[in-house]
Image (spheres, rainbow, N blue to C red):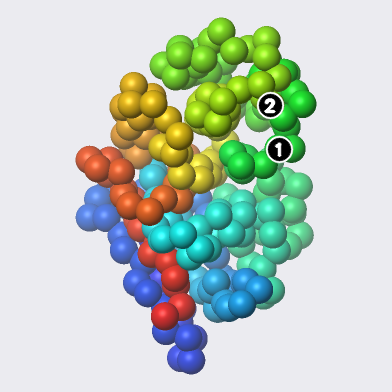
Amino acid sequence: MHNTSRHPNAPQAAVTQANRPKAAPILQLSGVTYCLPDRLLCERWSVVIAAGLTLVRGGDGSGKTTMLALLAGDVPPAEGELTLKGLPLSTEHEAYRRQVFRVDPRADTHDAMPVSHFLSTAAAQYPNFSTTDLADLLAGFSVQEQLGKSLYMLSTGTKRKVMLATALASGAAFTLLDEPFAALDWPSVNFLHEVLTDAAQHPSRAFVIADHEAPEGIPLAACIDLPLII
């Protein structure tokens, strides 16, 4: 990943790229500006996100969740373009979104759904969804016995495990995870660490995680430190 544009009146923090073989580009931002209620999140920002694992790092209130929403195409930029595997967000919004998996773990949008229905809906939505991977992930997170319950019946940690398993099994070209280790028990933290270590080497999927710090020992393709405008 590399930063290619800076507005002279809005110096932006460096986007650091790991010293690793060049990975396939997945998402390109060109001259993107996005305004938070009280400040700019980014201004005329251009960057390429490649396959592997990218970290969006920042403290509370730095805009991590909003950055994920922007990259996912859930909120439109004030200006500029996002292009995901050749699909411009501005003109191919639905096709762009079909390449993206992002669920806000704090939202209650899907809470009325039984877990089994949530999983089957995702499997139908994503053509590269792997039921084999899903079974392994559900077992790794020890949530196989929760499939008959509705999401609102689950603890915060268990709900997050279901959503993580779904995201990782989706096969989506661009998968975004917001503070993925939050509210997990230690066996699940260790399991997720192993899964993300494997994901970091994926040749054709980009995974973006937002968190306060980099997960120890997992190779990153790049790190985006917030705030971008300093």
Q: Residue 108 shows which numbered tag?
A: 1
Q: Amino acid at mark 2?
A: Tyr
User: Where is residue 220 shown, x and y percent of the image?
Assistant: 31, 48
Disc 2 is placed on an element classified as helix
User: Where is residue 31 shown, x and y percent of the image?
Assistant: 57, 75
Label 2 or label 1, whichever comes before in sequence order: 1
Q: Is residue 123 visible?
A: no
Question: Dot 1 surroundings within 10 Å: few (below 14), some, or many (20 or more)?
Answer: few
User: Where is residue 66 shown, x and y percent of the image?
Assistant: 59, 59
Question: Dot 2 surroundings within 10 Å: few (below 14), some, or many (20 or more)?
Answer: some
Is 169 positioned to the left or the right of 150 in the image? left
Q: Quadrant of residue 217?
A: top left
Q: Residue 152 shows which numbered tag?
A: 2
Extreme bottom residue here? 9
User: Where is residue 35 shown, x and y percent of the image?
Assistant: 63, 74
Check contact, mark 2 vs mark 1: CB within 8 A: yes
* Most foreground residue, 196 or 98: 196
* Most foreground residue, 164 or 28: 164
